[in-house]
Amino acid sequence: MPHLPVLSVASELYPLVKTGGLADVAGALPGALRREGIAVSTLLPGYPTVLGGLCRAEAAHDFADLFGGPARLLSGRAKGLDLFVLDAPHLYARPGNPYLGPDGADWPDNALRFAALSFVGARLGQGLLPGYRPAAVHCHDWQAGLVPAFLHYGGGARPDTVLTVHNLAFQGVFPAELLPALGLPDRALHVDGVEFHGAIGFLKAGLRLADRITTVSPTYASEICSPEAGMGLDGLLRGRADLLTGILNGIDVDTWNPATDPHLAARYGAADPASRAANKRALQARFGLAELADAPLFGLISRLSWQKGVDLLLEALSVLLAEGGQLALLGAGDPALEAACAEAAARAPGRVGCLIGYDEGLAHLIQAGSDALLVPSRFEPCGLTQLCALRYGAVPVVARVGGLADTVIDANPAGLAAGASTGVQFAPATATALEYAIRRATSLFRDRTTWAQIQANGMAADVSWAAPARAYAVLLREVTAR
Ligand code: ADP
């Protein structure tokens, strides 16, 4: 049977451009879907790093004027993936973060930048290129949220659309006056179209007009239908709940493989977790921590934002230290949180280490060298660091929200008695509950047999893309079969 052609539209893709989990998903899902008989090509904006990483690029289409300037659509490959890259210098020829200018603020023309991406995604879906006609367009987050809108208002034959929400907090809301500049008709500014509280909502448009909606865990799918977590979109989501599915993310188990990982001081597998000790020493050295083999070493790898609950951890830090623990924290983001983390490290030299920045290799070492990995998020659509932690034998200590609730089995008496536990969960997402979880984790850590069992359970968990890809394949076949 020939592969089902699907166009994925994303604003990030690992390893070409990444600010978060979306890039990991967009980079890994196509390979996993190929094994399910689905051929994914991905449309990406032509940021400098994307153009630089593109191999065998061929010009596929020219746009004389695409939202304010000439543009070319290139087709090519990178890292084994089929790509379409939108080379539009007036929109994307900017170094650094894909969304933010050098001052840390959103680029003022982000509406046009991602409307252009969505517009070209829609045109590709309608057969812009001879010989290429995807059965479905898989849109990721608000940056691709207008694809279903351009298809809906554009008329003509259209492919089916699936919108995946990686984080409902990012909605792409812009002034209504931009409507003509986006090339959408007046009638689109309607509650059943792109209108969102008097403005234009890119994510809202996708949620309203896509044929199917997915998000990245079953628990988050249910949470976002409630006013508490729905961020103003819960009413719309409840109305379309029959079209909403939660499919967990996986991780790329080749990139994240402690047996072959080039970033580690010592490589190891589930059969010899004791070799993690050398990574713990290397991690302690990198973070200026005292070389204590018996101190429970907690790691954290995160964007520093309110969502991630790093402030809760700073509040709970005195308990972590009183329990004899150490902390290695890697993160970047909110300047106030960056400063607070650096201050915490300065107050507890040798016990708390903090590196501000984005460092892929160091993230791997933290997974391999930490005894426990903290994810104290206030909300978490899926979360990837706890999945990597499971695979690397760092016991995840997580808030019981979203995908964290779905991927970690708490070491409560029932879980332990069943021999199933893989980590520690806490709720609600408060400093007090986190303190209790840290106490629980350290006391489990000191019970070497139980800890080894929890670690082994985690390392045996399937965190690959195999099961999620099967679920996406079923959904894509369903939506295109109608
Ligand atoms: P989000 O997408 O909300 O940022 P996820 O847990 O889904 O959170 O994905 C985060 C990804 O980014 C993980 O692969 C994690 O290892 C990585 N990451 C986050 N912050 C850093 C950092 N400072 N340095 C290196 N990797 C990071």
Image (spheres, rainbow, N blue to C red):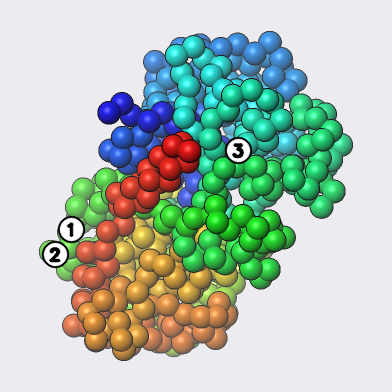
Q: Amino acid at mark 2?
A: Asp
> In this figure, which residue is indicated by the disc labeled 2?
272
Residue reaching furthest front? 482
Q: Is residue 295 visible?
A: no
> In this figure, which residue is indicated by the disc labeled 3?
144
- Vertical side of 468 occupied by 318: above or below: below
Q: Quadrant of the N terminus?
A: top left
Q: Is residue 408 visible?
A: yes
> In this figure, which residue is indicated by the disc labeled 1?
268
* Residue contact between numbered discs 2 and 1, judged by CB atoms under 8 Å: yes
Q: Amino acid at mark 3?
A: Ala
Residue in the picture at 25% in, 51% down: 257
| Image side of residue 409 versus residue 165, left or right | left
Callout in the foreground (3, 1)? 3
Circle nearer the N terminus (3, 1)? 3
Q: Nearer the viewer, residue 91 or 129?
A: 129
Q: Nearer the viewer, residue 257 or 280?
A: 257
Q: Quadrant of residue 239?
A: bottom right
